[in-house]
Image (cartoon, rainbow, N blue to C red):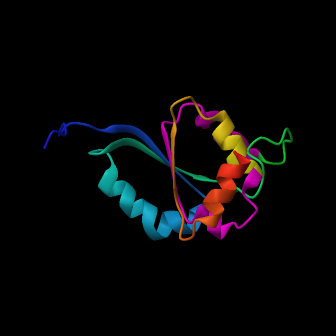
Amino acid sequence: GNLDENACLREVIFLDFAMKEWKEAVLDDLTQILSPRYVQNVTCKFCDITTPLLSGESDNIENGEIWQIVENTDIFLTSYLLTETRNKWDQFIVQLVGLAKIGAMFYFAEPMPWQLHRLIRLS
């Protein structure tokens, strides 16, 4: 095809509430497949979308580190995230969309569309 065989993403950041478990079960092996051939740098971080991305309080250190990388991110991919955190993601996701750079893309893979309809109304 037309793909450059030397094309490589600069960075992929995996975020999850249960990062320790996902990292050991899946992401360590996936990282070995992805890096360095397809991705230069892979990072895994804890994230809790049931708390605000920006709270103004020092009690949310983990999410505080995340908001700093949002403005440089090109694409956000989520899977079942809104469904799993049913009605607890509002503030985080609205802040995430608001902080994202112009032109950033969002992909939400959800089993049922009602969470996506809710997201659109909130945004």
**What span is colored magenta in the figure?**
61-90
Q: Left or right: where does residue 95 sit relative to residue 44? A: right
Q: Is residue 76 magenta?
A: yes
Residue at the (38%, 55%) spot, across then down = 31
At x 84%, y 42%, the residue is 58
**Residue 7, position as x, y percentages in the image:** 25, 37
Q: Please provide percent x and percent y for residue 38.
A: 29, 45
Instruction: Say whether residue 17 is visible.
Output: no
Q: Residue 56 at what x, y percent from top left?
A: 85, 38
User: What residue do we see at 84% from left, 48% from top?
Assistant: 59
What residue is drawn where x is 59% and y is 31%?
71
| Residue 66 coordinates in the image, percent (x, y) | 65, 42
Q: Is residue 18 left or right of residue 76?
A: right
Q: Is residue 97 magenta?
A: no
Please give left or right for residue 57 compared with residue 114 in the image.
Answer: right
Outermost residue on the top side: it is 102
Residue 43 showing in the rendered view = yes
State which quarter of the image contains the N terminus. Answer: top left
